[in-house]
Structure formats: structure tokens, C-alpha cells
Amino acid sequence: MRYTENYEVTCHDVDVNNNLKPSYILRYMQETANHHMRDRKPSYYDLFFQGKSFILTRITIEVYGQLHQYDKIQVQTWRCPEKGATFIRCYEISRGGEIIAKAYSVWAVTNHKTGKLCKASEVDISNYETEEPLELKLPTRFRLPKGMEFEKRGEKEVFYSDVDMNLHMNNTQYPDMLWNFIPDVMEKEVTSINLRFMKEAPLGSRAEIYMAKMEEPLPEDERAEETYCFISKIDGEINVEAEFGMKKLTEKQR
């Protein structure tokens, strides 16, 4: 069983080419997950005030087409069987029956009073709709290729508007933050996003952003013409690693 929510893409969610910005792919998915938690209990707030928070550790998103302003979309999400202290959640976005994006995400639950991880047995989410996880073409575990020469592309200060209830930059902020540095991004579209979160970016910190381009695109991303790799650092330590599959827009799409 899956939990389903319906939305209409707003004019503020798209870029100059009328394509949904990459952060909003993640936001529609996670908004649906939040509705799921709210309706089935425990909600995110219920858990938070018990001292527990879901923290995203990695997510893999495959993008098969582009969404535009005022598209009516359906987003589905479901809990997958847990493994130890690992919580898995999957997502699917569709428009008129056509699947536009799929995602596989891995979460941890932390006790924000003690800083320790919670085991699955300590978090009762048995009311949530549950299915087996999606099988994606992209590997759901990724490592950046060794030997790549990363170039510093910029910095980002973490402002109040960037953070969530944990006072860390919300994970949905990262795709747009990194995507901004892709060369000629106005002439391209996203085909995949891989994110691995390793260290929080607290309010007031400054992220240093480094980028490299793979010699060849990821072979598992059949739509990609190029793949860009990113490392974000906080106080010299890796905060996030990411891969973006990209392809050029056709003249008709511009």
C-alpha cells in the first residue's frame, strides 16, 4: 500500500525554462511524506516532541521527464521494512499516469537530546503504509570516483530561512544550492540526483562548495549526457557529496 497526495505545481517552483527546480522535486516528495506521518501518526511533530527526529542520510532520484507550472501531479510515498537503525522510504511522482520521477531514500532517527541513533524497535511507525522498496537503475549507494580534481566554486552561508526545526540546513535546500554552479545550467535539465549527507550545516555556518565533472556520464543514467560531482564542506569536513545527471535542452524545450 502507498500513501497518495495530489498537487498543482506553482509558478514559483519552476526555472526560466518552466521546468521544476530540483529542490522542488525533493520538496514535493517530502511534503507528501510529512502528510503521511501527520495522517497516520506519529507525525513529525509527535516524534520531535518525544526527542526524536528523522535525518536524511542519502537519497537517489531518477528523473524521466520535466514538470511545468500548473501541472497536476500525484505523489506517492511509502515506508519500507526497516533494517536495524536504518529507515527506508520510497517515492514516485506522476502526471496523468506517466511516471516523472522515482526516489529511494535512507533515514536515521536521532534522539536530539542524547545525540544517539534510535533503533527501529524504538520508533513505532507500524501505521504507515508499507511496501517493498523500489528497484532503481542508479545505485542507491554511491561513492564519488577517486582521483577527481575538485575546484572550489563558491560558498553558502546558512541563514535562518535555510534551517529546519533542528536548526540545520534543511536537506531540500541542497539540490538548488549545488545545481546553481553547473555550467550553462539554463540550457540543461536534470536527469538524476544522488545525495549523501555526512555532517549537518548548522545555522550560521558556511558551506564551501567544490565541483568536478566526470569524463563520461554515469552509465546507469541513460538520459544523462554529463555528470557533475559535488562536495560541500563545513569547517573543513565533508558535509554532503552529490552527483547530478544533466542533459541539454532541445530547441523546442527552451
Image (cartoon, rainbow, N blue to C red):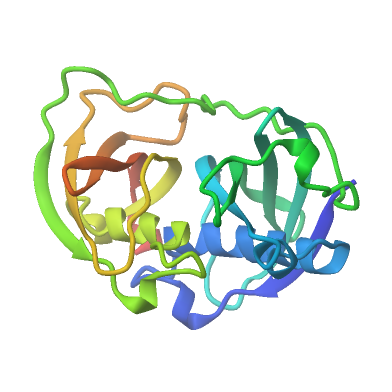
Q: Which sits in the foreground, 92 or 219?
A: 92
Residue 170's x, y, as percent?
Answer: 45, 62
| Badge count | 0
**Is residue 80 in view?**
no
**Is residue 4 in view?**
yes
216 horizontally vs 163: left or right: left
Viewport quadrant of the C terminus: bottom left
Image quadrant of residue 3?
bottom right
Identify the residue at the far bottom of this view: 11
Q: Residue at x 70, y 51 (%)?
A: 98
Residue 125's x, y, as percent?
Answer: 82, 49
Residue 149's x, y, as percent?
Answer: 11, 28
Q: Residue at x 59, y 74 (%)?
A: 9
Q: Residue at x 46, y 60 (%)?
A: 172
Q: Residue at x 75, y 54 (%)?
A: 76
Vertical relation: 132 (above or below) 98? above
Q: Which sits in the foreground, 186 or 124?
A: 124
Q: Which sits in the foreground, 67 or 145?
A: 145
Residue 30's x, y, as percent?
Answer: 62, 60
Identify the residue at the far top of this view: 146
Image quadrant of residue 95?
bottom right
163 horizontally vs 121: left or right: left
Q: Which sits in the foreground, 164 or 150?
A: 164
